[in-house]
Image (cartoon, rainbow, N blue to C red):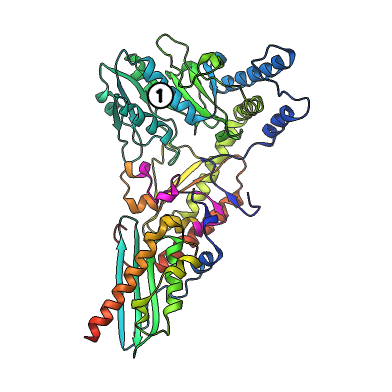
Amino acid sequence: MSAAAVYLDFAATTPIDPRVADAMQSCLSPGGAFANPASIHIAGRASAALVEQARQRLADLLGAEPHCLIWTSGATESDNLAIAGAAGFRAHRGKHLITMLTEHKAVTESFRHLEKSGYDVTWLKPDADGLLAIDELEAQLREDTQLVSVMQVNNETGVIQDIRRIGEVCRARDILFHTDAAQSVGKLPLNLSEMPIDLLSLTAHKFHGPQGIGALYIADRPGCKVLPIMHGGGQERRLRPGSLPVHQIVGAGTAAGIARDEMADDLLHAATLRDRLWRGIQDVPGILCNGSTDHVYPGILNVSVPGVEGESLMLGLEPVCAASGSACNSTSGESSYVLRALGRSDALAQSAIRFSFGRTTTKNDIDVAIERYRWAVDHLRSIAPLHSPGC
Amino acid sequence: MIATAAYNEAVRRHFADPRHAGDLQKDHDLTLVADVSESAEGAHIVMSAGIRGDTIAGMAFRVRGCPHLIAALELACRILTDQPVASLENFDSANITEELSVPVEKAGRILLLEDALATLWAQYASAED
């Protein structure tokens, strides 16, 4: 990353914690734990011990039993395994599935794939704040409903869903409940031992761990199982074949331990920064905060302004690195489907900027973002047509 | 996230300092105004040309669009100012596309510029009739 860059894109990925990098480096150094943990010799057993130690650390962060965690390559794979795997396991009981329009693509595309395979998917729309109405969910449940998937923290807006209540509704009807917790694990307190969650996806790089390593939590209870979607060796309870990447797993475990120890401070820090950022831009004419302001993870602030184009706003923001409402599939120029599901117009969704920050963000970073955002909006409005369609 | 490395130095320069952005002085023999938009892409152009005799004495634009489009409009205004009015009809955007390294997926945005220039020329021709 350029030295001058001001990185406010933590929802995309977080900078790796130096303590995590050190732990990983110890595996990669000569004499480190490079051996395949599936091997039964001394070196393999040393690697396996590190893998299990990391699994325990992650379990401690989640309030889960270690044997409930399956290592994967990240949240996308976990989502795919959870959704396709659970749907497949329960297919003999029924083929009705429920999710939300505002889920991450890793979830929505998994469900669309199942739709093409003969499953019936109900797509729930959130309210204008991005929240799911529980009675709306209850109204859509059927005798043949087998799986509900609702993310805990939305990756674009930071809106927090009431996953405890959703889980209770599902558990009462013996419906599996999956949550994509990529944006919340390591950031918000979570105790799976007392939560009615059957399947939970996470990835380490969202909480200062390395990219390329994640996990799927599968509750140890009757009827809660997934079928594998990949086939090979017998690793990870025969659910996720492939040699385990020891250094990445060690990094994930270390990051989980740090997140657990520093979560309270991290949350307070994020809330302070979000408040500072919002106070600095809230008087920009027409600015709108996207998503609930009450039920929101404080490390994300998503705002739209009428009359400016998102891609130009992004360039005007430099050196601030944030995400645009036309993010993820930038070449399409398509506006955010999440914000449109909240009822935002195409133009407002397209002008959205997601600022996300965390442990290493400074107040000065936020002040630079405030200055650049205000300049960019003023600049683009000064050259815009006086009346534009959709604005 | 949009990769800003996609913008070359010319785009960055014209984006940051679009000297022809704004409104045209009203001291010309004839003022032409084109208002074109592509709602599907959210881009909107208002382009003006001030004609004195058979020369483009001044140009200005307003735009809601991506950095490439902003830069393309600025560049077009610079090229066309002080040129014969007929330049509006014969304008070739290929040079602009090349100078700004406009990616293929944004070709539609440059077509919007061509639409604006064609509209200006049609207005001029109509006024001459």
Farthest residue toward the top?
Answer: A222
* A321 shown above or below A295: below
Q: Alpha-carbon neighbours of circle 1 within 10 Å: few (<14), some, or many (≥20)?
A: many
Q: Confirm whether the magenta stretch covers residue A319.
A: yes
Q: Confirm whether the magenta stretch covers residue B25.
A: no
Q: Is residue A198 left or right of residue A22?
A: left
Farthest residue toward the left?
Answer: B129
- Residue B56: in sight, yes or no? yes
Task: Determine which residue is flagged by label 1.
Answer: A83
* A65 shown above or below A213: above
Tell me the subunit letter for badge 1: A
* A118 shown above or below B66: above
* A292 shown above or below A243: below
Q: Is residue A122 left or right of residue B71?
A: left
Q: Position of residue A159 (x, y in %)?
A: 42, 37
Q: Quadrant of residue A127?
A: top left
Of the pair A344 and B83, the residue shown nearer to us: B83
Of the pair A290 and B31, the residue shown nearer to us: B31
- Residue A283: in sight, yes or no? no
Q: Which residues are magenta?
A: A315-339
Q: Is residue B12 left or right of residue A304?
A: right
Q: Position of residue A338 (x, y in %)?
A: 37, 41
Farthest residue toward the right?
Answer: A31
Q: Position of residue B84 (x, y in %)?
A: 38, 85
Q: Quadrant of residue A24?
A: top right
Amino acid under disc 1 = Ile
